[in-house]
Amino acid sequence: MTPVRTIKLKAVIGSHPHVQAVKSGALRSDLFDLDFIAYTPTNTAFKPMVREQAFDVCEMAIVTFLMAKAHGKPLVLLPATMLGRFQHAYALYNPAHETLGPSDLEGRRVGIRSFTTTTGAWIRGILANDYGVDLARIRWVTFEDPHVAEYVDNTERAPDDKKILSMLMDGELDAVLGETSDDPRLKTLFPDPALEAARWYTRRGVVPVNHLVVVTEQLAKSHPDVVAGVYDLLKRSKEQAGPAATPDLVPFGIEANRRSLELIVDYAFQQALIPRRYAVDELFDAAIEGLN
């Protein structure tokens, strides 16, 4: 009997607790081997995955995927959340210069690593839809290019020698999004982020997912059984790890992710990151139908 050939897949996935069994090799598949490539931070792998399909399997921010889809990149989304979190703690200001709240950002200089980050899209969506902030009246200052090269970034670029938190400390920025700090001189833009997040969840019923997993379209078309196996392996790892939080911050399955995906699609469209609102079912390739 001819042995089944095991496929070796290049993979980038962060060291999240719910995937440790897969990353350590404690959970394996007879169909494929995952050759994990270290990227620190994990988001530095998104650009080569979008632009070159540099890996077979890769963690990816959902807004990066939405923009990649809009520009025809050959990537297939799996409904496997690697990172989800409430976003209210990731907006800072410096009270030494003035006191700011979430409704006070119009006309201010607000820094963000890249305008297209998923955390940024979530927070801007919250500011616009829950606090009535006109995002077009904020002066956005960015530090990196978008992962999707085709996106035209019209924001102001910070000087190459500048760091985002240093600019906030020095008063060159009024607030920053997507950052946290232990520096006692800085405060969160939302006065009580945990309380704000709890209220937001009660109102929206959504866990804001940041990172899911993508595979190359080539792999999905040529080996759909392998792609299903990758998803199954990650899901079993999560089940083995057990629940880490309530609500579940790393939901698996299309239905479990549906409301979050609907909302981030809405926010991304409002912010002109994507050209139209995608239905959630459009985000998933026919090759992976049935994953739950």
Image (cartoon, helix red, strand yellow):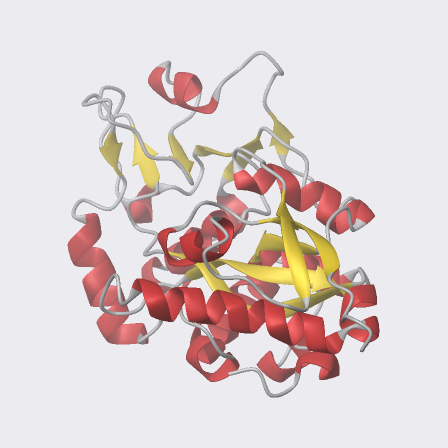
Percent coordinates x, y for residue 206 in the rendering: 35, 72
Q: Residue at x 61, y 72 (%)?
A: 229
Q: Position of residue 188 (x, y in %)?
A: 25, 38
Of 196 and 129, nearer the camera is 196
User: Residue 87 versus residue 61: which sits nearer the camera?
Assistant: 61
Q: Where is residue 146 in the image (x, y as percent from the top left)?
A: 67, 42
Which is nearer the eye, 191 or 85? 85
Residue visible at 41% across and 50% down in the picture: 16
- 276 sits left or right of 197 in the view: right
The residue sitting at 18% across, 44% down in the picture is 191
From this viewpoint, is residue 218 visible? yes
Residue 14, given in percent of the width and then of the height, sits at 49, 46
Quarter of the figure with residue 276: bottom right
Residue 273 found in image quarter? bottom right
Q: Which residue is located at x 26 percent, y 67 percent?
A: 243
**Is residue 17 found left or right of 116 in the rendered image?**
left
